[in-house]
Image (spheres, rainbow, N blue to C red):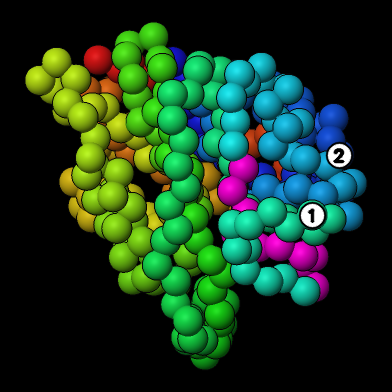
């Protein structure tokens, strides 16, 4: 089966600054992913034509099941934290997880969040900048894959150093706890998304195995890998991963074929 993760920058192309839904759908089709994790996803936002970008991607890839989890509601000029309750007539922004295989169970995991501004040193800035993080969430799906049940996690971690460490460790621990053993072996699990950290840091923190290596940021001439696919248990890459520039977003998509079981 094929796994892919893609920070879509709400479907916008840095080249022309335009959100073109046909171009976005074509990019998703090109990935040809069986399970796809998306980050920076809009739902009912003016900047992306009030489209449900999760639904557009689901139709493009032929997903039989998908979920969207909001981290922010409102519009980019007046964001507020999502509560998890239905908020009609309100634009949303968050992450999505989509699958061509049936999903047996879904859950959302809210991740630890800093409740105060903190100094962060960005490339090109002499002095640290005070920033306030947005809420972070993960979607967890038990996917009925051809090789057996595979637990897949999609997420977008904070860019704040050390705090994303805490989020990843917490998430990997929460996913493993309670997973059943399948015929005496640990349930295979995969975690993928924009983790805002460089390899091999995710593997060291979680003791999971990297399934995909490739520079993903910035898209035009990538110099670093911020997007990852890591696995636990009987799941392995069957070939080298690919880092794809799809003509939209400031990230490349990361794609890898895996065998489960």
Residue 75 image offset from top left, x and y in percent: 80, 65
Where residue 20 is drawn, which disc sits there? Answer: 2
**Total of numbered circles in the picture?**
2
Q: Earlier in the sequence, mark 2 or mark 1?
A: 2
Which stretch appears magenta? Answer: 68-77
Res 170 → quadrant: bottom left
Quarter of the picture containing the C terminus is top left
Name which residue lies at 44% across and 77% down: 114
Residue 5 image offset from top left, x and y in percent: 52, 37
**For this rendering, which residue is in front, 197 or 217?**
197
Q: Is residue 29 left or right of residue 251?
A: right
Quarter of the picture containing the N terminus is top left
Say what secondary structure mark 1 lies in: loop
Say what secondary structure mark 2 lies in: loop
**For this rendering, which residue is in front, 47 or 124?**
47
Tag 1 residue: 88
**For this rendering, which residue is in front, 85 or 76?**
85
Q: Determine if residue 56 is in view.
A: yes
Task: Give the prevailing secondary structure in the magenta stretch.
Answer: strand
31 relative to 20, above or below:
above
176 relative to 156, above or below:
above
């Amino acid at each position: 089966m094929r796994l892919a993760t893609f920070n879509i920058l709400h479907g916008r192309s840095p080249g022309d600054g335009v959100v073109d839904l046909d171009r976005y759908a074509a990019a998703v089709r090109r990935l040809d992913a069986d399970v796809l994790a998306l980050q920076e996803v809009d739902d009912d936002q003016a900047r992306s034509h009030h489209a449900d970008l999760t639904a557009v991607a689901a139709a493009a890839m032929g997903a039989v099941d998908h979920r969207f989890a909001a981290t922010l509601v409102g519009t980019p000029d007046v964001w507020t934290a999502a509560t998890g309750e239905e908020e009609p007539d309100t634009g949303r922004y968050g992450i999505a997880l989509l699958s061509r295989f049936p999903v047996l169970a879904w859950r959302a995991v809210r991740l630890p969040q800093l409740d105060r501004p903190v100094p962060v040193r960005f490339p090109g800035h002499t002095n640290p900048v005070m920033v306030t993080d947005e809420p972070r969430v993960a979607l967890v799906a038990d996917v009925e894959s051809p090789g057996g049940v595979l637990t897949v996690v999609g997420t977008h971690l904070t860019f704040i150093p050390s705090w994303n460490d805490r989020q990843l460790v917490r998430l990997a621990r929460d996913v493993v706890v309670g997973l059943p053993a399948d015929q005496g072996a640990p349930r295979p699990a995969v975690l993928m998304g924009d983790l805002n950290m460089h390899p091999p840091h995710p593997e060291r923190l979680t003791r999971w195995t990297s399934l995909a290596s490739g520079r993903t940021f910035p898209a035009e001439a990538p110099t670093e890998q911020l997007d990852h696919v890591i696995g636990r248990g009987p799941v392995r890459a069957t070939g080298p991963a690919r880092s794809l520039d799809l003509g939209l977003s400031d990230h490349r998509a990361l794609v890898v074929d895996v065998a489960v079981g």
